[in-house]
Amino acid sequence: MLDLYHYEPSANSMKPMLCLKEKGLEFESHYIDLHSFEQHSPEFVKVNPNGQVPALIHDGAVITESTVINEYLDDVFPQVPLRPRDPAARARMRIWSKFVDEYFCPALSMHGWNALIPGIVERLKKGEFDQLIERIPLKEQRDKWKTAATHSFTEEQLADAKRKVGVSIERMEQMLAQSSWLAGADYSLADVNTISMVTPVPRFFPEFLNEKVAPRTMDWVRRMSERPAFKAAIAMGRKPPPAISK
Amino acid sequence: MLDLYHYEPSANSMKPMLCLKEKGLEFESHYIDLHSFEQHSPEFVKVNPNGQVPALIHDGAVITESTVINEYLDDVFPQVPLRPRDPAARARMRIWSKFVDEYFCPALSMHGWNALIPGIVERLKKGEFDQLIERIPLKEQRDKWKTAATHSFTEEQLADAKRKVGVSIERMEQMLAQSSWLAGADYSLADVNTISMVTPVPRFFPEFLNEKVAPRTMDWVRRMSERPAFKAAIAMGRKPPPAISK
């Protein structure tokens, strides 16, 4: 029995959703509404003490961290393999996924938080935000909520994060010049782990992702979007992509 | 044929050194002196375009990122397995290694850079540092060198990094309360990937790592230190641990 706790098919939640769909695995979906702060509720913190989605429960074991969840799924359900058989290509898959986790995702995420969180917080009653903040288990997450809610990311931080998004797309172009998928000839977790970071880029920074400057990445997005598993994961969404005011 | 480019048996270089020794694998050692900026030399940048150690060459493939190198070694040379067989324990190994890479290591590293880099830079001739900085491939690394060289980490940054080192040791205590090794009953890459981050802690922050506040981690350090592979890796060092002036 597989239970996945997730938000929309976007950001880190998308990664195991797409992986499960690629593998054709049945799973119980538990939708956690981040806009209602459900990830910090006492019920969910019992599942993941860090108060973060996604989280997978399988045979009583709780697996967290989207990149690790996907390696776990490939360890346990190797029938549709999503890691290259060649160890060097597998290392390339892991190096790229690590780059996405440590560089690309945090950079894009800062702009996502900056654009979206103030609107979420404004809808709350006076004092409610302070109570909700206190429930957040990780200090780093509490600080990020407070910073985003008060529009306190500095211009310098936002400019540097924007630059990193540009660097990330440039690196993708370089990778896709070498092979049709990110870790080589085979579609792999490198691709699964990256698509949800790439799809928001045109909304935020169209100058980084268009046919002229990043044709290979544009083609990769098209090929990803056509996959039945991608469509099935997207169909699990409940909300349209958020509008951003810049 | 295995070629490892590494610095001292400390920080990220220690991770593949210890892994190779645990597996009893012969390898060609290429010592890269970080204090002489050899990692940014044109010769080494041909090996790793990011200008960072460690890097492994095996059968013509270059593998970078110490955590990935160790998974690669376990993929290719599984005779002495260093990943738990149980997938949930394996996920725990990966979650912990990710935490070390993303949280523990950067926090400790900031204090290492702050304590050591100014002394390295002072020994250079005037103008030499600027030339050396220009060779660094990654902007983030260039910025870190400049910040460290001019003692420009803020008090707030250093205090937060110190706090994170404390949190990291607390988490280790919690992990080691559950099982004798970090990912469960089996010694694994979680342990291999962590020892070089723990051994400098008593020099920097003795208040975080002593028999009173962290007895399980102290015991784990002793058990690690007694392993023949650990002794063999340490024996490859050329310099005593650096003195720090605080």
Image: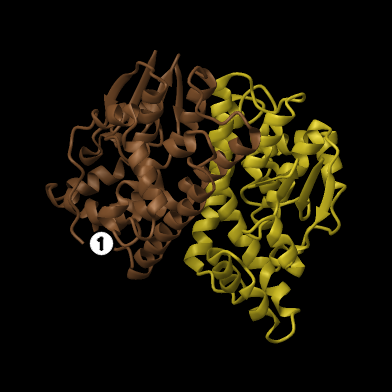
Chain colours: A brown, B yellow
Q: What's the residue type where badge 1 is placed?
A: His
Q: Can residue A72 be seen by looking at this rendering?
A: yes
Identify the residue at image location x=59%, y=43%: B169
Quarter occupied by the N terminus of chain B: top right
Q: Position of residue A218 (x, y in %)?
A: 35, 49
- Between B152 and A16, the residue placed more toward the observer is A16
Give the quarter of the image for residue A204: bottom left
Q: Is residue B7 shown left or right of residue A11? A: right
Identify the secondary structure beneath mark 1. Answer: loop
Within-10-Å neighbours for mark 1: few <14, some 14–19, many 20+: some
Quarter occupied by the C terminus of chain B: bottom right
Furthest-bottom residue in this view: B126
- Between A180 and A206, the residue placed more toward the observer is A180
- Between B76 and B242, the residue placed more toward the observer is B76
* Residue, disc 1: A151
Chain to which the residue tagged by mark 1 belongs: A
Q: Position of residue B223 (x, y in %)?
A: 77, 33
Identify the residue at image location x=84%, y=53%: B237
Q: Position of residue A94 (x, y in %)?
A: 56, 40
